[in-house]
Structures are given as structure tokens and as C-alpha cells.
Image (cartoon, grey):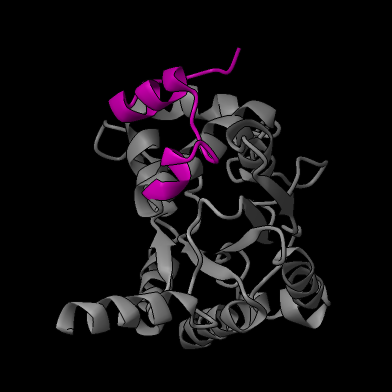
């Protein structure tokens, strides 16, 4: 009798509304929220987003890049981008499991934005709640490292100019219980390994150490995919998210990589 009741309990639990279905039931749909270091490649910006969507999603997985040049955690909402993204979550969730990556910081830290680190953290926490209410899975992303080096010791080392935002993003994730990927740490380690000459091959244009060209988008988009697979291994197991093996080897070994 006890075994029957236990079986009935688990059967009922599985059927309760609001509980996540198996990822095998639906392919993922990634909606990318962020600033120009997520956005599509353009004259004044470009990030990892398109490389991620175009080269790492498979077997029916889809994505859409809502990254916006100059965006902050305030302007992305005030300008309507956030509402547009949430409407898309509602639209696709019947046939897909929506995942919303959220990466800001580059512009929030500028004095002209007038956003304190406490406000930045609170804004990320609110984003998390909004995504959950809409039926999506929020994934906070620490900001992509800038490719700026300090050579004062004779060994070029990445300047960790986004460390406060990195810590705040992780804090917001832990407070809300949201998943996060530490792209800032991973990109910093990789850039330190390959050095400035190779790192600047990924610049959108000469002298731009923040934005990525198409090759850089593919490399760091692959890095994001690898981090997502670590946090959501079922997506990798199902083949929805994958990283080119040659790129993954280069990332793991800290070796410069140029997509063929």
C-alpha cells in the first residue's frame, strides 16, 4: 500500500501545473537580452550573440538576439526592448522552452548612466522575476571582458574593469536562485592566455577592444554555449546546444582560434 501511495504521489507531482517539463519535450528558444557586447555586429557594436545563435544551436533549437547598442538595465526596459522580449517568451513557450540570457554592465557602470551598483543588482533581480512570470528560464551572464591589457609588470594582463558588475551579477543570481554563467571570468582567463596580439584579432575595428567582429562572435558565442552546457547539461546531451570540437579544445587549452 505504501509503495502504491508513493507511486501515486510522484505521478501527481509530475502532472502539477507550473513544474518544468523534461527538456526532451521541447527544444529551447534562447532570447538574448543585453548591450552591444551581446548585439549583432554593426558599425558601432557587436557581441557574442549572433555567433551563439548561428553556430551552436541545433536539432530545432532557436534563438533571437535582442541585444541593443548602448543599453543599460534601465534603458533596456524604458525603451520597450524588455517588453518586446517578454512578449516573445509568451509567444514561443507553447512549442519551446524559453531561456532568457541577461547580460549588462558595460554601460551601467558609466557615470552618465547614473546607475549605482545596488540599482544594477536590483534591476537584474527584477529581470529574473519577470522572466519566470512569463514562463521562461532566466540565465544571468556576467559581462564579457574588455580586451584591455595592463603591461606594467611586463606580462600583459587583462584589466578587470567589470569586476564590480561581475560580482553584482552573481549576487543577483544567488539571491534569486537563478542560474548564471561567469562569462567575465571565462573570457578573462582565455584572453590572458592568448595575449593582446591575438585578442585584438577579434576587435570589431582597429582600436575597439570592447566589440567583436564576426570571428570573435563565433569564438565567444561558443564560449557562452560551453558554459550553458555546463549549467544545463541536458541541453548538450539532447544535442540542442553544441560547440565545435576544435573551438572547444582551443578554449580549454587557452589557444588562439580563428574560425574556418
Quarter of the picture containing the N terminus is bottom left
Q: Residue at x 62, y 35 (%)?
A: 58
Residue 162 at x, y = what percent? 45, 61
141 above or below 215? below
For the residue pair 166 and 29, the one nearer the viewer reads as 29
Residue 90 relative to residue 32: left or right: right
For the residue pair 82 and 117, the one nearer the viewer reads as 82
Residue 91 at x, y = what percent? 79, 68
Q: Residue at x 61, y 84 (%)?
A: 133
Residue 205 at x, y = what percent? 71, 32
Residue 202 relative to residue 243: left or right: right
In the image, residue 257 lies in the stretch drawn in magenta: yes
188 above or below 13? above
Quarter of the picture containing the C terminus is top right
For the residue pair 246 and 231, the one nearer the viewer reads as 231
In the image, residue 86 lies in the stretch drawn in magenta: no
Query: Is residue 22 among what the camera can see?
Result: yes
Q: Residue at the front extreme?
A: 1
Bounds of the magenta span? 233-260
**Hey, which quadrant is residue 46 in on the image?**
top right
Q: Residue at x 57, y 79 (%)?
A: 132
Q: Residue at x 43, y 71 (%)?
A: 169
**Hey, which quadrant is residue 81 in on the image?**
bottom right
109 above or below 8? above
Residue 61 relative to residue 105: left or right: right
Q: Residue at the top extreme?
A: 260
Amino acid at each position: 500500500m505504501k509503495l502504491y501511495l508513493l507511486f501515486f504521489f510522484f505521478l501527481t507531482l509530475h502532472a502539477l501545473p507550473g513544474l518544468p517539463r523534461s527538456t526532451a519535450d521541447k527544444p529551447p528558444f534562447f532570447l538574448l537580452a543585453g548591450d552591444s557586447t551581446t548585439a549583432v555586429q554593426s558599425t558601432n557594436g557587436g557581441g557574442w550573440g549572433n555567433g551563439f545563435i548561428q553556430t551552436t544551436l541545433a536539432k530545432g533549437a532557436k534563438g533571437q538576439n535582442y541585444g541593443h547598442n548602448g543599453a543599460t538595465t534601465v534603458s533596456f526596459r524604458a525603451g520597450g526592448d524588455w517588453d518586446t522580449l517578454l512578449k516573445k517568451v509568451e509567444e514561443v513557450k507553447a512549442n519551446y522552452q524559453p531561456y532568457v540570457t541577461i547580460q549588462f554592465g558595460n554601460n551601467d557602470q558609466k557615470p552618465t548612466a547614473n546607475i549605482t551598483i545596488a540599482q544594477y543588482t536590483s534591476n537584474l533581480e527584477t529581470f529574473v522575476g519577470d522572466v519566470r512570470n512569463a514562463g521562461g528560464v532566466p540565465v544571468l551572464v556576467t559581462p564579457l571582458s574588455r580586451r584591455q591589457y595592463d603591461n606594467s609588470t611586463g606580462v600583459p594582463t587583462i584589466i578587470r574593469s567589470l569586476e564590480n558588475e561581475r560580482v553584482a551579477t552573481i549576487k543577483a543570481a544567488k539571491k534569486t536562485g537563478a542560474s548564471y554563467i561567469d562569462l567575465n571570468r571565462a573570457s578573462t582567463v582565455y584572453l590572458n592566455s592568448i595575449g593582446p596580439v591575438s585578442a585584438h584579432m577579434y576587435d570589431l575595428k582597429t582600436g575597439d577592444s570592447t566589440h567583436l567582429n564576426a570571428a570573435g562572435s563565433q569564438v565567444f558565442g561558443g564560449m557562452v554555449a560551453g558554459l550553458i552546457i555546463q549549467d544545463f547539461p541536458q541541453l548538450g546531451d539532447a544535442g540542442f546546444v553544441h560547440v565545435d570540437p576544435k573551438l572547444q579544445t582551443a578554449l580549454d587549452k587557452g589557444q588562439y582560434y580563428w574560425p574556418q
